[in-house]
Image (cartoon, rainbow, N blue to C red):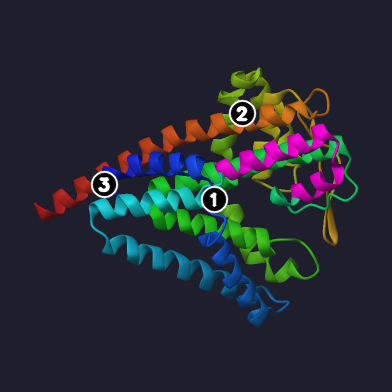
């Protein structure tokens, strides 16, 4: 646990740093972790679930343990600086908003070829056959899903377990994005990464859906519409965690998401219809970005409260132990 009064302040500072400076263009720790993961996959890959389990355990165990050792070695002020930097690095809120905003600008300019390339910054689906409406829908779905994966989940795990919790969550999320696909290559090897990501985001995804419903009025929506879409439509989604957040976002925005085939390398997912209303337009991308930002702020407030409570409980236990 964070365990000190620096916790809530460190989370808030990290969010501010992320939005003020964004991701570094070079030397990003997540990119470095990805390169290590690629090299380890090259050496250890086998069409076998056990190989995938070992792959995940070594990578997330190494990253989390290294973070924990460094965190414990630092004095109080050093933990605050370290925790703030880890928060800023692990969060994807500002990058998500910028990528979606760039997509909106490209679609407004009619530059579909570049827009299809831009979609790769948001998700891994095949964009070659998508038109402007399809790209807008994919962008909004990705904003909703990544608000849970790259923002709310990171803040919640950080609130409870400090910097090492954030690194654990981001490492699992990164491995899922790399190997957690139901393709012929990764169906077995990537099983552990995909199931680990599902487990770690089970609670954050539902919290994201709740916050999305609560924040619906900010984009002209109604909380009950978001709640109804979540309860009615989420179960049909192939992902147990993307379903609730995408359905809630559809209800909050008053649009229909899903209802199509999404292609990923050598497999495809048939998505259910999520929400009610017209298909999303280019203008709805900006609304989705504003909704995501509101959910991030709400999750920061909640996570700061959780971090403060965890710190208070841990401090009380330490005082009780000394007594």
Q: Which tag, 1 or 2, sits closer to the chain's start?
A: 1
**Mark 3 → mark 2, Cα distance in angstroms:** 32 Å
Please state the horizontal and vertical placement of residue 97, each as a whole percent of the image.
62, 38
Q: Residue at x 81, y 69 (%)?
A: 184
What is the C-alpha distance between the residues marked 1 and 3? 27 Å
Residue 287, position in %: x, y? 67, 27
**Up-down: is 30 above or below 37?**
above
Marks 1/2: CA distance? 20 Å
Residue labelled with disc 1: 23
Q: Position of residue 55 (x, y in %)?
A: 59, 73
Q: Examine the image and state in which quarter residue 196 appears.
A: bottom right
Query: Which residue, given by chain and number where applicable, does mark 2 sit on?
Result: 290
Is residue 142 among the parts visible in the rendering? yes
Q: Nearer the viewer, mark 3 or mark 2?
A: 2
* Label 2: element kind: helix
Label 2 crowd bin: few (<14), some (14–19), many (20+), radius 10 Å: some
Secondary structure beneath dot 1 equals loop
Magenta stretch encompasses residue 207: no
């Amino acid at each position: 646990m964070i365990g000190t009064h620096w916790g809530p302040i460190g989370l808030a500072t990290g969010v501010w740093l992320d939005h003020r400076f964004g991701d570094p263009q070079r030397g990003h720790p997540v990119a470095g972790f990805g390169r290590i993961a690629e090299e380890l996959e090259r050496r250890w890959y086998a069409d076998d679930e056990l190989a995938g389990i070992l792959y995940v355990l070594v990578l997330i165990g190494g990253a989390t343990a290294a973070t924990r050792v460094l965190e414990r070695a630092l004095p109080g002020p050093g933990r605050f600086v370290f925790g703030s930097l880890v928060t800023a690095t692990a969060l994807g809120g500002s990058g998500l908003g910028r990528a979606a905003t760039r997509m909106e600008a490209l679609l407004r300019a009619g530059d579909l070829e570049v827009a299809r390339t831009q979609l790769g910054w948001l998700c891994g689906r095949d964009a070659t056959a998508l038109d402007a409406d399809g790209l807008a829908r994919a962008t909004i779905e990705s904003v909703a899903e990544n608000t849970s994966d790259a923002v709310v989940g990171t803040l919640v795990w950080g609130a409870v377990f400090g910097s090492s919790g954030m690194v654990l969550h981001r490492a699992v999320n990164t491995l899922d994005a790399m190997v957690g696909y139901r393709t012929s290559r990764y169906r077995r090897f990537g099983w552990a990464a995909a199931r680990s990501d599902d487990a770690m985001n089970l609670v954050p995804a539902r919290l994201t859906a709740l916050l999305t419903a609560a924040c619906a009025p900010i984009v002209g929506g109604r909380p009950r519409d978001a709640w109804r879409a979540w309860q009615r439509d989420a179960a049909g989604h192939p992902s147990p965690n993307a379903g609730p957040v995408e359905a809630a976002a559809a209800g909050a925005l008053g649009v229909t998401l899903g209802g199509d085939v999404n292609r990923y390398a050598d497999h495809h997912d048939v998505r259910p219809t999520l929400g009610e209303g017209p298909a999303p337009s280019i203008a709805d991308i900006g609304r989705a970005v504003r909704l995501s930002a509101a959910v991030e702020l709400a999750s920061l407030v909640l996570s700061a409260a959780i971090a403060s409570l965890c710190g208070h409980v841990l401090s009380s236990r330490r005082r009780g132990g000394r007594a």
